Image (spheres, rainbow, N blue to C red):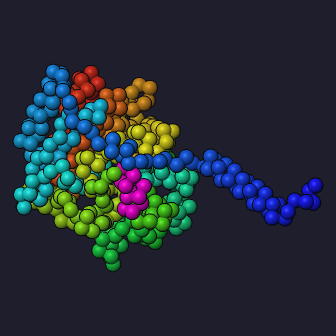
Amino acid sequence: MLKKVQPKVWWAALAVLVILVVSWGLVRKKKSGPEEIMVDGKMVSKLDPVPVKNPDAATLLKISKIEDIFRRKKRAGFNGNVLIVQKGQVLYQNSFGFAHLKKKDTLNSHSRFQLASLSKPFTAIAILKLVQEGRVSLDDSVQRFFPDFPYHGVKVDMLLSHRSGLPNYIYSFDDSVRHGKKYPDNLDIMDWYAKVVPTPTPYNRPGRSFNYCNTNYCVLAAIVEKVSGEDFGRYLYDQIFAPLGMTNSFLVTDTSSAAMQFRTDGHQFGRKLDKDYYDDVVGDKGLYSTTGDIYKFYNGLSQGLLLDKKLLDEAFKPRSFERAGIRNYGYGFRMHTKEDNTPRFIYHGGWWKGYNTMLWVCPEDEAVIIVLGNSYNRSTYDLKELLEVIHGPGKVEEIEKDI
């Protein structure tokens, strides 16, 4: 009976069997690897906040108090943009002052501000995406990516949580090292550390204590470039900005017409500040964005569009535990913690060459405050009165006036 079966039939049956086996293997491989997060247009369109509709008396009073607070901030010299959202609805949005003080061009919602250290949460998420994909491990040493890096025992999780003990690159190199390229980039910094003699003294042993240091995030951005094979700005665009519809976010090193549009200048004492020697070093700073894009970033992150919940919880886990207190740091995010060591507030601020920035989040109240300034003014960080309006005095009684 079997002899009567034509050879063509046998070959067809064999082909079907091969296809089934290969398909089964691919399914198995897909299930065993990291789950890919799919982002579609409908999800992205819901990341923007919506105007408050039919506000009740309590909400109207809250809005009125916020308006009064920012009128006073303006009189105190605040120059910048504000966005305050609660439960997905805009409580307050406004612009004060100018993008360029000399030109007297009015700020608007499209104005892009240098985020300074508020760039660090974006760098942290960029690294954690590589961790999620299995391309980087939190236990990896810097030498895995840069074998000549002179500080041993420094791991990725220590960089993320500022526990590396590394010296700050801004103060590490004297004028004899700063020659050749006028504005160094991240790879130049890595090369300097590898070659300079003597090696700059570290602040502490790796993992021993928390010490906020820009070098950590400079190194993280360099690792992203090394692993991805892409410019850091391109990686941010492909993996964070484009998926979330963040069309107004660019690195300082991007000089395309699209990136330069709506870009503000930083000012101090009423004058524009020129480009800094370290301006092209990114990851610790260097991101230009808007209040709207920053809200999309946090909203998309909290909805699981960038990281799975388990890894996101790691980012919001307190990792600075040498001193008792409410302040702490996770992976790229500062926080004020509750008694059970979970975050009551999640935030990050920034200052760089005239720019002051702040992202403040209360997960329990679903409230997000974004304040971006481009003319140095301490009132940017003075949030206590504003927080009492949004959250109530009971939640903020321990918060210092200046965050």
Q: Position of residue 225 (x, y in %)?
A: 45, 63
Q: Residue lying at the far bottom in this picture: please name it.
A: 180
Q: Is residue 166 visible?
A: no
Q: Is residue 354 magenta?
A: no
Q: Is residue 60 above or below residue 151?
A: above
Range of residues picked out in magenta:
233-244
Q: Is residue 36 left or right of residue 264?
A: right
Residue at (30% x, 71% y) in the render: 183
Q: Is residue 73 visible?
A: yes
Residue at (25% x, 37% y) in the render: 50
* Image quadrant occupied by the C terminus: top left
Q: Nearer the viewer, residue 178 or 375?
A: 375
Q: Is residue 272 left or right of residue 312?
A: left
Q: Quadrant of residue 258?
A: bottom left
Q: Nearer the viewer, residue 264 or 139?
A: 264
Q: Position of residue 180 (x, y in %)?
A: 33, 78
Q: Nearer the viewer, residue 38 or 399?
A: 38
Q: Is residue 179 above or below residue 227?
A: below
* Image quadrant occupied by the N terminus: bottom right
Q: Position of residue 269 (x, y in %)?
A: 10, 55
Q: Position of residue 285 (x, y in %)?
A: 31, 56
